[in-house]
Image: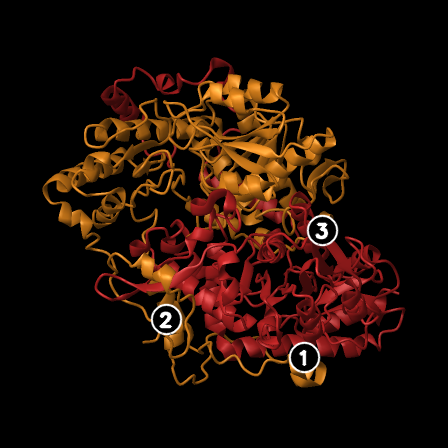
């Protein structure tokens, strides 16, 4: 796993023509592009892209793949990302030709199975959340957030209200304030109470008639459940606002609690977290949004509908916010999520969350003596330590993270919550064996000892990875964002 | 005991004892009783064999594009699908990893994105490309919002050609409303291209951007230089949308024709139709605007020993740093789809992509010539306009009627042109690709001959 792989553009420098793939035979007469297209729009050549054989290309990606860490390699306890196992049967199902080779604009009579699948997943998500209705459209969590906030905006407009602020706790993920802004609201930060949860007095003060609602993550990014959720929901609703729950951490309570009973008006679900669809090195995910009766009229179109003749698509509805994307959903991601839900069933889903919470508490228990825990409230699916004990030796969370790479584990999340300086957010999820989780704890304890005795080992880490610590400042100050012939990437 | 859950009953009991809890219920005791639930009402668990049978059953209820000759397009195309693409996607090192926030153990993903960015720059003729967006529709939204930002929100109108994909336009309307961006549609002329006079009449000091799709929704190649000139004439950002990325194998990208942003849908590069997703949004712009760009970027750098490496960069534009002032709220993108496109493009190579595009072009030319000979009311709506691989055909009936009657004849002939309205005639949008064999093309023409 230690070989440097050149950029593909550095291969075949003489640009000799080789075929990496054979096209279907030319069985109609060839036309000259300039004969049928405006000559000034026709491309001269594409010779920057090298021509290589199939094996060259396959080797290139094989070697590149070996430079990656992945869930299949070892524990990936990246907080808030829920890096659980991606079951292989789901991958097989999502590759069935009856799913991959269907076009979104075929007549609905030809795609009844696909529509039924979407319907059944919607029903499952409704029952898992206790919410009234669902849209499967959003492509990711942040996209789901925006879908929900645009619905809230529309619902308030329908009431003749023009509220321009949205409250977001200071512990929130960055997408929450960004989403509020893109939904046309001013994001107003609400400071957390001493235990890391929402400060009810502050909420009471800030929840004015300018406020459209509150965006709240449950459990929050500290892994702490908002135990006053009912009072919070009540306060928001009494003041005429709506409650958006960020479901990024839903893995903490499936089969144990219902967001619908918490007073949520909208809640998105990251299928690529809780329901095991792969993260794919950054995506694609899927972020369905479940809503209460209040927001149901505003759901995006097109919607899957059920009628006497089967399933159909409804493209128009005056009250809808409109479509959020091209077509219906990241359908092949939905296939995987439904496979996961059907495989676990009601008991399995409940056990899933129970074990996720159990493991996080095991990590908390084992690491408690070696790492500082700023917020001592009970942990659910994740626990957030910080580096303050190690910082005395000049060792920071980033150093701990880099050294952990040498031990064969993916580091915890460090970039948030912003209310924990030097955060180490650990989410084991439920899929690993206890031995793997314990081995991670051992590594973290060893690191804490190293930080005291040999801080340089952390400061200079990583030592065992394909490249050493990268100069990210240089990358930003002198951006090189593409290869150029003879450019810096080639030298 | 489920195979995807790591701890069995004995393990759980042992861990509970270690952490000093009497029961699992105690771990949830901070949740108010009224939100707790005993179980959720999903169907009972299926073993792996039964699960596959169930899903195969659902898949089996669909008619696939391989079951009869298909000419559906309208933003989703059926191109060659080399086996090597899915083989690479199936490598767990790629599909089971997260966003490459830890570059030292993510060089594979990072280098792939760097190569993807480079290829998109080459194809679009622009200087910077991002690591992907969700799809073509949301890429158009991001471009429009970026044009709005470049003008600091002081110009609140954006002009969008009616020939931009109707779904993309509708999605833009969904987003624009909330941000005070006024979307104004510029009509098409009789040759199915954007009406240049209408565009010139519409531009003004309050216009932040002009959005043109080429090849457009009706398959027609737009007069891109004129559109870019009209945009720049009033200081607006010129945006080209591409919904059929294979066209870039033969057509210049808008960057070479004066456009500031070129974005759209790259599903054509090795991504299955998949009932509409996940597909691949791409986005490229000029270097001067990079700090207003949405989405992740990968840059080149060095490690402590001077070895080349790649990392995410210019992140101060993004939500995890800039929060409410970010250039987009996007976090998870469509990275694995960008990998698919990169493998596909590198397999085909420059000469392969050109050959593929020429094949599309030749097959479209063949079909256009043959349509004229069918009779029975069948004709090209725009016989004088240049197209890449898609065209509007008029026939003996409305678009939806033609779809149905052609399906009865064993051909998936196209997409109804007015499925979402539009001021063009009601007919069929018919797309061909390099996979439309002579045999399939003949079958289409023969079926049209029978539908009168």
Specify the chain shown as orange: A
User: Which residue corresponds to the image point at 73% horizontal and 71% vertical from the top-left?
Assistant: B220
State the CA–CA distance, disc 3 to disc 1.
Answer: 40 Å
Task: Report helix, strand or loop for mark 3.
Answer: strand
Task: Report helix, strand or loop for mark 1.
Answer: helix
Q: Are marks 2 and 3 in contact (CB under 8 Å)?
A: no
The subunit letter for the residue under badge 2 reads A
Relative placement, left or right, of B355 versus A486 is: right
Q: Does A35 sit above or below residue A190?
A: below
Task: Report helix, strand or loop for mark 2.
Answer: loop
Residue wearing tag 3:
B182
Q: Does A190 sit above or below residue B77?
A: above
Q: Are marks 2 and 1 in contact (CB under 8 Å)?
A: no
The label on residue A7 is: 2
Could you say where residue B384 lies in the image, as x and y percent from the top left?
Answer: 81, 77
Local packing at callout 1 (Cα closer than 10 Å; few below 14, some 14-19, many 20+) is many
């Amino acid at each position: 796993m230690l070989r440097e792989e050149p950029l593909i553009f550095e291969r075949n420098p003489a640009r000799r023509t080789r075929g990496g793939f054979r096209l279907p035979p030319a069985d109609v007469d060839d036309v000259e592009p300039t004969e049928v297209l405006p000559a000034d729009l026709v491309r001269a050549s594409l010779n920057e892209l090298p021509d290589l054989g199939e094996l060259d290309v396959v080797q290139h990606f094989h070697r590149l793949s070996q430079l990656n860490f992945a869930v299949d390699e070892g524990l990936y306890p990246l907080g808030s990302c829920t890096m659980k196992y991606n079951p292989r049967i789901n991958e097989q199902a999502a590759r069935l030709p009856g799913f991959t080779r269907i076009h979104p604009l075929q007549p609905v009579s030809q795609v009844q199975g696909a529509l039924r699948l979407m319907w059944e997943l919607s029903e499952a998500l409704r029952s898992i959340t206790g919410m009234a209705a669902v849209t499967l459209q959003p492509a990711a969590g942040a996209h789901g957030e925006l879908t929900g906030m645009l619905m809230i905006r529309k619902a308030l407009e329908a009431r003749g209200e023009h509220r321009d602020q949205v409250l977001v706790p200071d512990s929130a993920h960055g997408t929450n304030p960004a989403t509020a802004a893109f939904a046309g609201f001013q994001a107003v930060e609400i400071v957390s109470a001493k235990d890391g949860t929402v400060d009810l007095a502050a909420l009471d003060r800030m929840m004015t008639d300018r406020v459209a609602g509150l965006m709240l993550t449950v459990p929050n990014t500290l892994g702490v459940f908002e135990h006053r959720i009912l009072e919070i929901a009540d306060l928001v609703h009494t003041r005429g606002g709506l409650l958006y729950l960020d479901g990024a951490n839903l893995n903490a309570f499936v089969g144990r609690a219902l967001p619908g009973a918490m007073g949520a008006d909208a809640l998105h679900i990251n299928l690529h977290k809780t329901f095991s669809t792969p993260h794919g090195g950054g995506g694609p995910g899927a972020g369905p949004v479940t809503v209460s009766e209040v927001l149901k009229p505003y759901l995006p179109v097109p919607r899957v509908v059920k009628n006497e003749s089967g399933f159909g698509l409804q493209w128009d509805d005056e009250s809808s916010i409109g479509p959020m994307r091209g077509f219906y959903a990241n359908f092949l991601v939905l296939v995987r999520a439904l496979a996961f839900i059907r495989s676990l069933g009601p008991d399995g889903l409940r056990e899933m969350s129970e074990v996720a919470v159990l493991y996080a508490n095991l990590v908390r228990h084992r690491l408690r003596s070696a790492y500082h825990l700023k917020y001592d409230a009970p942990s659910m699916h994740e626990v957030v330590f910080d580096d303050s004990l190690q910082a005395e030796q000049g060792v920071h969370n980033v150093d701990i993270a880099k050294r952990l790479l040498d031990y064969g584990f993916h580091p915890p999340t460090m970039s948030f919550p912003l209310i924990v300086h030097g955060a180490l957010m650990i989410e084991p999820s439920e899929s690993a064996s206890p031995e793997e989780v314990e081995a991670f704890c051992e590594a973290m304890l060893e690191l804490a000892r190293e930080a005291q005795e040999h801080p340089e080992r952390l400061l200079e880490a990583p030592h065992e990875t394909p490249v050493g610590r990268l100069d990210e400042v240089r990358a930003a100050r002198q951006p090189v964002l593409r290869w150029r012939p003879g450019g810096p990437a080639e030298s | 005991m489920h195979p995807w859950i790591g701890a069995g009953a004995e393990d759980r009991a042992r861990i509970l004892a270690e952490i000093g809890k009497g029961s699992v219920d105690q771990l949830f005791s901070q949740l108010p009783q009224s939100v707790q639930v005993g179980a959720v009402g999903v169907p009972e668990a299926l073993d792996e064999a039964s699960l596959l049978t169930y899903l195969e059953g659902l898949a089996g209820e669909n008619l696939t594009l391989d079951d009869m000759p298909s000419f559906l397009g309208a933003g989703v195309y059926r191109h060659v699908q080399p086996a090597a693409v899915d083989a690479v996607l199936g490598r767990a090192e790629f599909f089971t990893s997260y966003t490459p926030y830890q570059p030292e153990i993510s060089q594979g993903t990072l280098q792939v994105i760097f190569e993807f960015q480079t290829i998109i720059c080459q194809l679009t003729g622009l200087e910077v490309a991002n690591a992907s967006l969700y799809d073509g529709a949301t890429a158009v939204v991001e471009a429009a919002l970026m044009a709005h930002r470049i003008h600091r929100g002081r110009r609140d109108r954006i002009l969008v050609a009616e020939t931009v994909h109707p779904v993309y336009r509708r999605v833009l309307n969904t987003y624009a409303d909330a941000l005070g961006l006024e979307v104004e549609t510029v009509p098409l002329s009789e040759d199915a291209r954007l009406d240049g006079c209408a565009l010139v009449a519409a531009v003004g000091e309050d216009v932040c951007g002009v959005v043109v799709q080429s090849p457009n929704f009706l398959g027609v190649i737009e007069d891109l230089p004129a559109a870019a000139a009209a945009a720049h004439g009033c200081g607006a950002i010129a945006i080209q949308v591409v919904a059929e990325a294979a066209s870039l194998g033969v057509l210049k990208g808008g960057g070479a024709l004066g456009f500031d942003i070129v974005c759209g849908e790259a599903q054509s590069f090795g991504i299955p139709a998949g009932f509409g997703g996940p597909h691949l949004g791409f986005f490229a712009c000029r270097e001067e605007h990079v700090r207003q760009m949405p989405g992740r970027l990968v840059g080149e750098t060095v490690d402590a020993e001077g070895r080349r490496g790649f990392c995410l960069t210019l992140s101060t534009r993004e939500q995890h740093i800039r929060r409410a002032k970010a250039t987009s709220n996007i976090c998870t993108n469509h990275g694995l789809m960008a990998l698919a496109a990169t493998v596909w493009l590198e397999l085909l190579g420059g000469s392969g992509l050109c050959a593929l595009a020429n094949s599309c072009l030749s097959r479209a030319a063949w079909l256009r010539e043959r349509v004229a000979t069918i009779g029975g009311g069948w004709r090209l709506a725009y016989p004088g306009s240049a197209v890449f691989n898609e065209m509007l055909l008029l026939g003996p009936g409305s678009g939806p009627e033609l779809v149905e009657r052609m399906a009865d004849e064993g051909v998936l002939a196209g997409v109804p042109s007015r499925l979402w309205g539009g001021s063009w005639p009601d007919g069929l949008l018919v797309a061909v690709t390099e996979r439309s064999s002579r045999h399939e093309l003949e079958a289409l023409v023969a079926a049209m001959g029978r539908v009168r």
